[in-house]
């Protein structure tokens, strides 16, 4: 039976000196085996040279340290979506029923709003959301959109977020 090997991810600093690696710097990764299994050490080139007389690793290799890319910006900032939903809720214009629903769902997926209830109506249902941080309640009509309507509503929401009307 093969043992499970849970090897840590690449470190961002030297295991010996604790000096952070710089972008583009070469370093060595050493895998050691002991009674508990395999463990990893990432060493700067300087520490590697000093390590030469130490215990022999199970495996080792040389890599180039690359900083992880910065996180991608959100396609639509949360605050922009939230602000637009608040604005549309205040205006309460019937032509924005679909946009309010989509904005509410977007904020629910971002864990800004949490659905706490739903109430049936004669022509659909009302979704009751609670703002996770402020505790505010949002009541949004679910227009029961069909799949073939989503693209049009997405374009409407994008236009509204971009500062324009439909």
Image (spheres, rainbow, N blue to C red):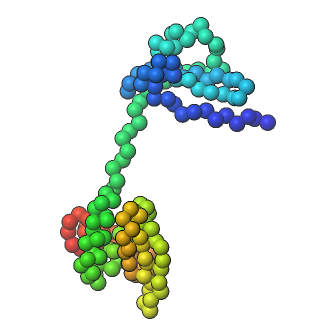
Work out whether residue 63 or residue 89 is closer to the camera in this orientation and state it.
89
For the point 54% across and 34% down, the residue is 9
Q: Quadrant of residue 104?
A: bottom left
Location of the C terminus by quadrant is bottom left
- Numbered-mark total: 0
Q: Where's residue 93, x and y in %? A: 26, 82
108 shown above or below 124:
above
| Residue 82 image-quadrant placement | bottom left
Q: Look at the image and tell me whether residue 70 can be seen.
A: yes
Identify the residue shown where x is 47% and y is 80%. 118
Residue at image position (38%, 27%) is 23
What residue lies at 39% left-to-right and 68% top-to-bottom?
135
Residue 98 placement, left or right of 15: left
x, y (%) of residue 128?
43, 76
- The residue most toward the front is 135
Point out residue 117 in the picture as x, y percentages from the top left corner: 48, 77
Task: State the image coordinates of residue 68 (x, y, percent, origin top left).
Answer: 41, 36
Residue 122: image quadrant is: bottom left
């Amino acid at each position: 039976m093969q043992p499970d090997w849970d090897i840590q991810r690449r470190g961002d600093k030297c295991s010996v000196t604790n000096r952070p690696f710089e972008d583009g710097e070469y370093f060595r990764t050493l895998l050691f085996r002991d009674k508990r299994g395999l463990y990893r050490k990432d060493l700067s080139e300087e520490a590697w040279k000093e390590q030469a007389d130490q215990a022999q690793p199970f495996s080792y290799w040389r890599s180039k340290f690359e900083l992880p890319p910065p996180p991608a910006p959100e396609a639509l900032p949360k605050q922009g979506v939230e602000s637009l939903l608040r604005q549309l809720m205040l205006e309460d214009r019937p032509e924005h029923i679909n946009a309010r629903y989509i904005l509410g769902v977007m904020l629910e997926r971002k864990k800004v709003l949490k659905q706490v209830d739903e109430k049936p109506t004669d022509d659909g249902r009302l979704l009751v959301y609670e703002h996770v941080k402020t505790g505010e309640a949002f009541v949004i009509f679910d227009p029961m959109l069909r799949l073939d309507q989503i693209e049009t509503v997405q374009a409407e929401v994008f236009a509204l977020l971009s500062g324009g009307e439909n």
